[in-house]
Image (spheres, rainbow, N blue to C red):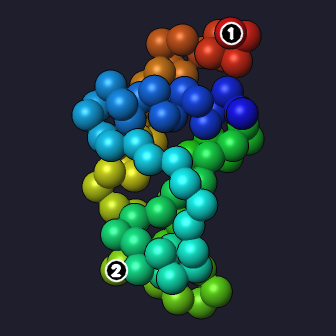
């Protein structure tokens, strides 16, 4: 799949964050502790609301924040080199 996605998954694993890929239901999204999206332009962005319903407390969660910070640090040190692999 995408380079940004793969990089974020690898960063999460390196941080000891469990990564599970599966099809999920809207109910699982609505009841999630945290949610974020990734993409080349967006990098990693928190999702705090879906269909007008807040995810958890409606704020980015600690795991999402850690992943975003780790990705930003990687970009600072590696730059766009991660997109060339």
Check residue 57 in the rendering and tell me which mark sits there, or answer none: 2
Question: Are the residues tagged 1 and 2 within 8 Å (C-beta)?
Answer: no
Residue topped by disc 1: 85
Residue found 33% across the figure and 43% down from its top: 18
Question: As rendered, which of 6 and 70 lies closer to the eye?
Answer: 6
- The picture places residue 36, in percent across and down from the top left corner, at 52, 57
Residue found 52% across the figure and 89% down from its top: 53
- The picture places residue 38, in percent across and down from the top left corner, at 62, 46
> Which residue lies most toward the front here?
22
**Real-space Cα separation, disc 1 to disc 2, in angstroms:** 37 Å
Task: Give SS at disc 1.
Answer: loop
Question: As rendered, which of 12 and 41 lies closer to the eye?
Answer: 12
Task: Give SS at disc 2.
Answer: loop
- The picture places residue 85, in percent across and down from the top left corner, at 68, 9
Mark found first going from the N terminus, 1 or 2 = 2
Assess disc 1: are there few (<14), some (14-19) or many (≥20) residues with their C-alpha within 10 Å of its C-alpha.
few
Q: Quadrant of the N terminus?
A: top right
Q: Is residue 33 above or below residue 27?
A: above
Residue found 38% across the figure and 35% down from its top: 12
């Amino acid at each position: 799949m995408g380079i940004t996605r793969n990089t974020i998954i690898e960063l999460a694993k390196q941080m000891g964050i469990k990564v599970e890929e599966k099809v999920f239901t809207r109910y699982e999204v609505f009841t999630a502790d945290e949610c974020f999206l990734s993409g080349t332009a967006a990098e990693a962005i928190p999702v705090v609301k879906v269909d007008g319903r807040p995810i958890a407390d409606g704020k980015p969660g600690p795991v999402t924040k850690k992943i975003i910070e780790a990705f930003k640090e990687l970009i600072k040190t590696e730059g766009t080199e991660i997109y060339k692999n």
